[in-house]
Amino acid sequence: MLTRRHLGRRTGTLALAAAGLSLSRPALAAFPDRPITVIVPFAPGGANDLAGRLLADRMRPLLTAEGRALVENRPGGGSAIGADYVRRARPDGYTLLVGSASTLAVAPASGASAARYHPTEDFTPITLVGTSPLGVVVPAQSGVTTLQQLVDRLRAEPGRIAYASSGVGGVAHLGADYLANLAGTSAQHIPYRGGSQTAESLIKGETLYAVDQLGSVVGQVRDGTLRLLAVTTRRRDPNFPDVPTVAEAVLPDYELTTWTVMAGPRDMPGDVTDALSRAANAALAEPRVRERLESTGTTPVADSTPASTRAFLDREFALYRNIVQRIGLKLD
């Protein structure tokens, strides 16, 4: 015989089932109930690191009042080591990646042993944080004042001019090699650990040029220690309207951009993914966050979805794979 108490329990169970809710799974309101680890696969100090720290700071209160997010830097392997760490993590939303084109396009496209992953098949895309042009920079004291002069130097001394990058297999490595390739010559690659060391190598005269994310060198460009010769996007950067693009200055076929994406391990729950995406977008819509990112040359994107981020990654991976094949970049 069903009592009033039993009937109430049964009715509540049927109502939950009809709503498609699981009785055994905690409500989404419980997420996160412990700190989220945000993996930045680069050394501290670059634009990617700044984006990761801004998101970690501002997403916390947008998820739960007591939410916490901690940034952990795991550089190495052209940023693939940090990405692979996230790939192997539990898909519960508590370990996230803030990666770049180096992480989720160049490294897997070039066959790095640490990057035996696919950007969308092995990860759960969450949000597109922003896009950033790259800049061709030289030391202010180098005597090189135009991109044409740099290309002329490369052609006059094939294989002897050194360029800096923030690591083997990174987008800066690809961008500089691609520049020499389209110019019909070659250059010597000197890898460093992070954008700050790249700029330092230029200032010290250890290398002649770099094709790096503007956010990593914008401070040195503005203080006059580095000279920005060109940007790599099809259109001029609004922060530097007098600086030409590579395409209009010398090499019409050259176009390259980098970006920042937040992702998690494959097979994350849809409701957790959506909650993280909404929180990230809300953070990216805040004026203070936008101003910080824009000051480093990153254009924030505050309206992406997990689905649109997945489509974006698939397109960019195909683009970078074509460039990698053209220049014959092979890692390991």
Image (cartoon, grey):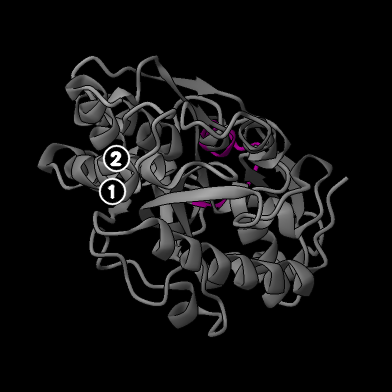
Residue type, mark 2 in image: Leu
315 or 327, nearer to the observer: 315
Q: Residue at x 39, y 14 (%)?
A: 34
SS class, disc 2: helix
Residue farthest to the right? Answer: 332
Image quarter of residue 245: bottom left
- From which residue to which does the magenta span run? 199-212
Q: In which quarter of the image is the C terminus?
A: top right
Taking the spot 60% from the left edge, 25% from the top edge, the residue there is: 74
Crowd rating for badge 1 (residues with CA inside 10 Å; few <14, some 14–19, many 20+):
few
What residue does disc 1 label?
Answer: 19
147 over 74 or under it: above or below: below
User: Which one is in front, 297 or 41?
Assistant: 41
Residue 49 lies, with reference to residue 17, above or below; the image says above
Mark number for residue 16? 2
Kind of residue at badge 1: Ala
Tell me the CA gap for discs 2 and 1: 5 Å
Q: Locate residue 279, reporting x and y percent.
A: 25, 39
Q: Is residue 191 above or below residue 325?
A: above
The one of 303 and 318 positioned closer to us in this rendering: 303
Observer able to see residue 297:
no
Instruction: Kindly identify the residue that appears in the image at 54 percent across and 73 percent down.
Output: 148
* Res 30 visible: yes
Residues at badges 2 and 1 in contact (C-beta under 8 Å)? yes
The residue lying at 69 percent from left, 33 percent from top is 81
Please provide percent x and percent y for residue 144: 51, 58
